[in-house]
Image: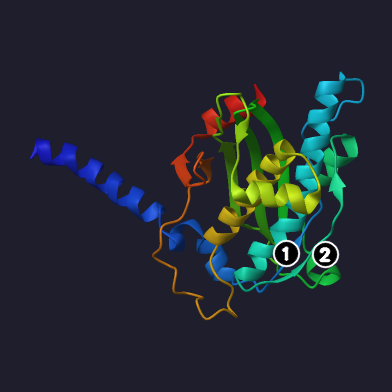
Amino acid sequence: MKRLLLILPLILLAIAACKSEKKYVRYATLYEETPRSIHVAPLFDLTPHKKDADSATLCEYQRQAVAAHFFNQTIPIGIRQRGYAITTTDSILYPGIRTARRLKSLQDGDPSRYCVTHDADAILICSLLAWKGTPTEPRLYAEYQLRSTKSGRDLMHSWVRVSRLIDTAYNGQLLTLPEERTIADDLQTDIVTAILCYMVQQANVFIMQDIPFAPSSYFHGKDLYLKATKQYFKAIINSDGTLEIEPFSLEEFENECFL
């Protein structure tokens, strides 16, 4: 009997863990409120943008700035594919006191005015928190928050670390993916910038593919029992282009991103 009492809590924890991976648990509030339209707030690019850095660092900042603009261009695509009506802005807010206040207001304040001004049931708040890593393994830390403009509740809140594992040739040249070379051609930019753009694109695609379909979609309600991502996770883009998703704890994320 004592042994059964010891085992029972473990069984209940295992069952709870399984349930927590299902979309009907992860997105319970979103299913409850069934938003039909989403407003995408200006992107909060909180990564460093120093003007007095050396030329190499300034070049890296410029590449990251291009990636931030590419983020803005690609975030609406995945939202529309899920069946939501969308309004968006191309503006980007950089680090500063006003930006911090604006972000806090959107994340914690009353978002009901967006229901009227943009005819939106929800508002998506995206933040680029940090770029780190090495030339052969760049890493991006980003935050996505979807809030109801009617109740103010979180419909989705995710933190992701996106990393790109890059092989090199014998001469040190980066071995890139066809998609990255296409981005470089389309944007008329260098391949390193294109890699960063591909990373933000993949992050946006994956995040948006995880949220439930809109009520107007034929697939609405058919994804209740599909597996959902955790709030904190790693998205690893391998050298062959495959994507791996791994769990990530709050402590790991904060230690890597902010320390």
Mark earlier in primary sequence (1, 2) = 2
Residue occupying image coordinates x 85% and y 47%? 92
137 or 249, which lies in front?
Answer: 137
**Residue contact between numbered discs 1 and 2, judged by CB atoms under 8 Å:** yes
Rendered location of residue 133, percent (x, y): 63, 26
Q: In the structure shown, which secondary structural element does the residue marked by tag 1 occupy?
A: loop
Which image quarter holds the N terminus?
top left
Residue at horizontal 70 percent and vertical 33 percent from the top: 130
Q: Residue at x 64, y 21 (%)?
A: 259
Dividing the picture into quarters, in which one does residue 197 lie? top right
Q: Viewer-proximal residue, 56 or 28?
A: 56
Asked if residue 105 can be seen in this view, the reply is: no
Q: Is residue 136 left or right of residue 225?
A: right
Amino acid type for the residue under numbered disc 1: Thr
Kindly give the residue lying farthest to the top in the view shown.
Answer: 54
Tell me residue 247's x, y (percent): 45, 40
Q: Residue 241, image x and y in percent?
A: 52, 46
Q: Is residue 26 above or below residue 253?
A: below
Q: Residue at x 57, y 37 (%)?
A: 164
Crowding near pointer 2: few (<14 within 10 Å), some, many (20+)? few
Query: Which of 210 and 190 lies nearest the eye of the viewer?
Result: 190
Residue 97 horizontal side relative to residue 72, left or right:
right
What residue did someone put label 2 on? 113
Q: Is residue 77 above or below residue 179?
A: below
- How many C-alpha atoms fall within 10 Å of the one at disc 1: few (<14), some, or many (≥20)? many
* Residue occupying the far right of the picture: 52
Quadrant assignment, res 137: top right
3D distance between C-alphas at marks 1 and 2: 7 Å
Residue 94: image quadrant is top right
Tell me the residue that label 1 is attached to.
149
